[in-house]
Amino acid sequence: MFRIVHARQLSDAVFEMGVEAPRVARKVRAGQFLMVRTTERGERIPLTFSDWSPDEGWVRFIYMRVGKTTHELSHLGVGDPIADLVGPLGVPTHLEPVGRVAIVGGGVGAAVAYPVARAMAEAGNQVHVILGARTRDLLVLEEELRALPDVSLTVVTDDGSAGEKGLVTAPLKRLCEARAIDRAFAVGPAIMMKFCAATTREHGVPITVSLNPLMVDGTGMCGACRVTVDGATRFGCVEGPDFDGHLVDWEELMSRQRIYVDDERVADAEYSRSCSCHL
């Protein structure tokens, strides 16, 4: 069992949770993820590390309440146990002094963008973060990103309720056109990453994307996380989650992500009906 040491609600459906896991905290690197199971009879879900402390022995992750398991998580608080927490998993984001880097984080993708931006800046890069969401209430980790030294931040919302009105690709395109970046990194909804990749391709800027394919075990055994990159089958959990965004088969990825949407809705609805703590 792993004890929850931090819990806060960031918006109507987005939550942050910290768990005591000293052995995991000593090994985490930016870009990696963990598998969480709330109870012994529950399912495993992949979540990305948003922060960690090797000295204090905790790790944090951010999640959106979209299905049964995340619904269960949202009802847990400080002191409650979680059955399983496995990590760190995946290949850490490749860090080197490449010069000027644009990091695009959409929605809960900010959970990945934050530690990657911090690590990129620590590696000696000039970092510009583009943080996007549908509306102000869904912006995640804006204050934390603003507090990072040597990192500039542009906020974009679809409805204009915070920052610029529009899509994250607009400021990304400006940076590309001004030849102000040498590399880009994007994490968020697949459709957002797809268009970030298209924007950078047009201007010859390399881009790394952090993919979120379906996962069951997170160790490469089940094959559920397979994605096609440059015409070859790759496994997101052990070869990713980072891949060359210009080589990803985006249509296949998005199609596979939608396979269990209806089943997830049914499971969440049944849980809501039976849960006495339903919000």
Image: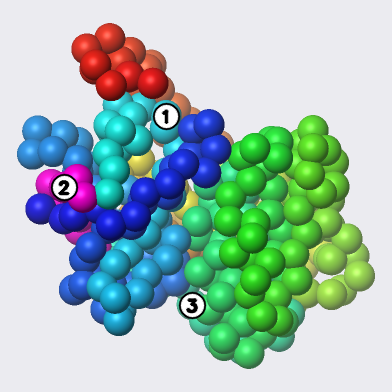
Residue 183, image quadrant = bottom right
Question: Which of marks 3 and 1 precedes in the sequence?
Answer: 1
Mark 2: give few (<14), some (14-19) or many (20+) Cα within 10 Å. some
Mark 1: give few (<14), some (14-19) or many (20+) Cα within 10 Å. some
Q: Amino acid at mark 2?
A: Pro
| Residue on which the image places disc 2 | 81
Q: Is residue 231 visible?
A: no
Q: Is residue 105 visible?
A: yes
Image quadrant holding the C terminus, namely top left
| Residue on which the image places disc 1 | 66
Residue range highlighted in magenta: 79-87
- Element marked by disc 3: loop
Which disc, if any, is residue 94? 3
Looking at the image, is 195 positioned above or below residue 23? above
Q: Amino acid at mark 1?
A: Val
Distance of label 1 from label 2 (alpha carbons): 21 Å
The mark lying in front, picked from 1 and 2, is 2
Residue 68, image quadrant = top left
Residue drawn at the location 21% of the way across and 72% of the way down: 22
Q: Residue furthest right?
A: 178
Coordinates of residue 75 in the picture (x, y in percent): 30, 33
Question: Which of marks 2 and 1 precedes in the sequence?
Answer: 1
